[in-house]
Amino acid sequence: MSLRIFLAFLIVANVASAIGVVYARHEHRQLFVGFKQLIRERDELNIDFGRLQLEQATWAESNRIDQVARNRLGMVFPEADETVVVRP
Amino acid sequence: MPGSDKRAAGQGGFRALMGRVLQKGESRQKPRGRAQFNLRGRLAIVAGTLGLCSLTLLGRAFDLQVVDNDFYQAQGAARFLREVPIPTSRGMITDRNGEPLAVSTPVESIWANPQVLLKYPQRLPQLADALGVPVDHLTRKLSQRADKEFIYLQRRMMPEAAQAIVKLEIPGVFSQREYRRFYPQGDAIAQVLGFTNIDDRGQEGLELAFDEWLRGTPGAEKVIRDRRGRIVENVDLVRAAEPGKDLTLSLDRRIQFLAYRELRNALLEKGATSGSAVVLDVATGEVLAMVNLPSFNPNAVEGSDRDAHRNRSVTDLFEPGSTMKPITVAAALETHAITPQTKFDTNPGWIPNGRFRTNDTHNYGVLDTTGVITKSSNVGAAMIVHRLSDQTFYGYLRKLGYGQSTHSGFPGEAAGLFPSPDRWSGTSKQTMAYGYGLSVTPLQVAQAYAAIGNGGKMIAPTFVKGQRNEAHQVMDPVVANEVLRMMETVTLPGGTATQARILGYRVAGKTGTARKASAGGYARRYVAFFAGLVPASNPRFSMVVVINDPAPELAYVGGLVSAPVFHNVMDGALRLMDVAPDDLDAWLAAQAAAEAKRHPKTAAVTAGATQVAATQATTTAAPTPAATGALR
């Protein structure tokens, strides 16, 4: 009798663990998909950031700044006699 | 027949029915005749055979499913599971202030499976149109590789253009993400950074030197793919992609550009063919700027002149000319062969050297040690070196890095040419005293000068911010200071490089003009050097300017060709790096003079008012915008 109960218990446990495995596997896939999604999002953001940095660096390229300052804005560097020196 | 059945039922339905029921056995056996076989036996055989068959099947099934399942599982997996690489980006290179100098950004490469694509020839014109190539060209390319499964159609397209092609949904055409390197600073810094190849691997310059550091490790993941190669499901991450690490260089983008601009202008103005400039931080050995001309656009390496790729500052060798003299003097001072006051009679402006002569440009008469530096007297330097033994002189120069690589870590760095005394000819020692007969890279000169400015401690230059190489005491601090004072006279009135003076700062430096060696002697072609240290009271920067092959009919001496570049770059660099002026009096004097010129009558009053304002003002920055405003 006790053997039968034990057997029944084993069968139930077996089925339960099988369902557990299936569930865990399913969850793993779900989480993995979510993980990939987040990774992709992070990459996209990183890429965007990189592009913006690149864009900024391109606009801020020294030669361009120099040209714009001199030609468009008419800026010049103050000569020595145009600078006021303040004794510390 | 239905008729006879009805009749029989009508004649005696009940009896017939009963009889059938009671004598079922006999009435059935009757038509079959003989009953001479064992029914049970037959059934057992059939059941047994069927049972055995199913047992065998079950057993085999069990065997395949549980015991020996590897083979078919592997076969199954091989039909849909794939390990695909995860691309990763190369690390960014920034300057010391975090400004990007090299950035990798994703692009798309279009690839095709020719085996699939060739089955749809009617789509080829559409594809060729989208790619912008002639149809027959594409067809030929595909049919040549008809048995392959992978072929790049176009690499490194802008992602938007690639997506448009993928959206056409031509069978067997896919896109793949790759990375491409962009250099926002363009040619100003091209040779130092180097560049990467199409697979984003470093090929030259710092991209090559730090390839391991910058390069990421691509990851891998398991995916399920369908028959057409589309990813159905991500199964597992085998290895996470490890993006490349960022690299912060010691270079300063602003000083770099300044040096580039000034060097370019000088080259144009003086008709020179090439040039280099190096700025070192004296205290740390960090390379703040390193420019070379001619340069190239690192964003479009193909088709550029290979000759322009070279980082001349570390690979090209020049005879250092008179920039050698302070080192010669230091060697003699340190061995107490001379003192700063020792007198040298340079009459009549030349001195024999074997069959040859060592000449000065003028006859400077009697000079003290400082005067030898100030006037850059070859004869004086020759007289000094004769007080030193060969081995002492050689050893001293070796200690200062001549004839050996600076160990900056730059790929392809040259060690220079500095033969040992046993290979010297009779004239070698005397010519070396003023910088002929040995070859150095501009970086080596900058390093040696930085050691003079750093109290005699030499530090190997580095390109990485924060990295500090070990310092070696190669020169007595007292001697270093004496030489520095002597070099200051070079930029004062009467020196050879008055154009290197910077208002508000004391400048120590040395000019150098070397005639270029050519077949059978020295040609009328020159290399113009200037090496300097600012501010001289406590040097922060060591800068070397080398201008190669200036047009001799315009100007060729270092003091006229290279010193102005030094002045312009250092003037900006000192301001950019917030170095306090150490010669305010000169500045105040210049200001008073300018005031006097503008308002001759009120000059005295204004000068006085400036003094009052100066004592009241708390910051030095405040008056600058006002001055700029007034100017505009």
Image (cartoon, coloured by chain):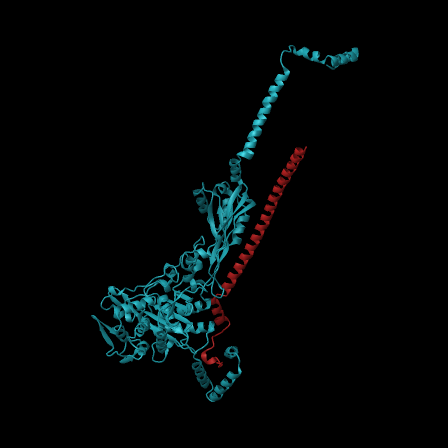
> Which chain wears cyan?
B
| In this rendering, position of residue B121 left or right of residue B567 | right
Q: Which of the 4 quarters of the picture holds residue B282?
A: bottom left
Instruction: Name the foreground residue: A85 vs B402.
Output: B402
Q: Is residue A53 above or below residue B612?
A: above
Where residue B495 appears, as percent x and y from the top left, is: 34, 78
> Residue B76 vs residue B356: left or right?
right
Residue B210 percent location from the top left of the image: 43, 58
Instruction: Judge left or right: residue B415 versus residue B24.
Output: left
Q: Is residue B308 above or below residue B49?
A: below
**Residue B189 placement (x, y as % from top left):** 43, 63
Q: Nearer the viewer, residue A63 or B345?
A: B345
Direction from residue A52 to residue B552 in the image, left or right: left
In the figure, what tint was chain A given? Answer: red
In the depicted view, which residue is nearer to us: B417 or B105?
B417
Image quadrant where one finds the N terminus of chain B: top right
Residue B266 at least partly seen: no
